[in-house]
Image (tube, rainbow, N blue to C red):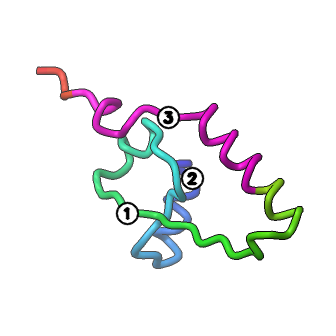
Amino acid sequence: MKWAVECAITSGATCYDLLPGDYEYKRVWCEDRRLVSEVECFHPYRPSALVFRAIRTLKRCLAKPAPIAETITAPAE
């Protein structure tokens, strides 16, 4: 990742997007955070849409991440 950031800087980039997700390595590289939202559009009564929504709901229930406030620890003194 260091190489990618260095290449971006030498190319003149002023912003480097670490993409969505709350991971420790991202907090090491940057303190700023952005809210990422998703918009999904589909016909609510089509069978494929019902299956999609059921699977998405199941995945979200099974993979509940800990809230960000609970995962951040105070720096060691």
The residue under label 1 is 34
Q: Nearer the viewer, mark 3 or mark 1?
A: 3
Using the numbered discs, state the Cα–Cα distance from disc 3 to disc 1 in whole angstroms: 18 Å
Q: Nearer the viewer, residue 22 or 51?
A: 51
Q: In the rendering, which numbered label is found on residue 65?
A: 3
Q: Image point 77% across, 76% down: which residue? A: 43
The type of residue carrying mark 1 is Arg
The type of residue carrying mark 3 is Pro
Highlighted magenta segment, given as a residue range: 53-73
The residue under label 2 is 3
Q: Residue furthest right?
A: 47
First reached walking from the N terminus: tag 2 or tag 1: 2
Q: Quadrant of residue 38?
A: bottom right
Q: Residue furthest top?
A: 77
Mark 2 lies on a secondary structure that is helix
Q: Image point 34% across, 52% down: which residue? A: 30
Q: Image point 57% across, 53% down: which residue? A: 3
- Classify mark 3: residues with Cα within 10 Å, few (<14), some (14-19) or many (20+): few
15 left or right, relative to 59: left
Please determine whether, in this image, residue 5 is positioned above or below residue 9.
above
Mark 1 lies on a secondary structure that is loop
First reached walking from the N terminus: tag 3 or tag 2: 2
Q: Image point 80% across, 58% down: which residue? A: 50
Q: Nearer the viewer, residue 2 or 48?
A: 48
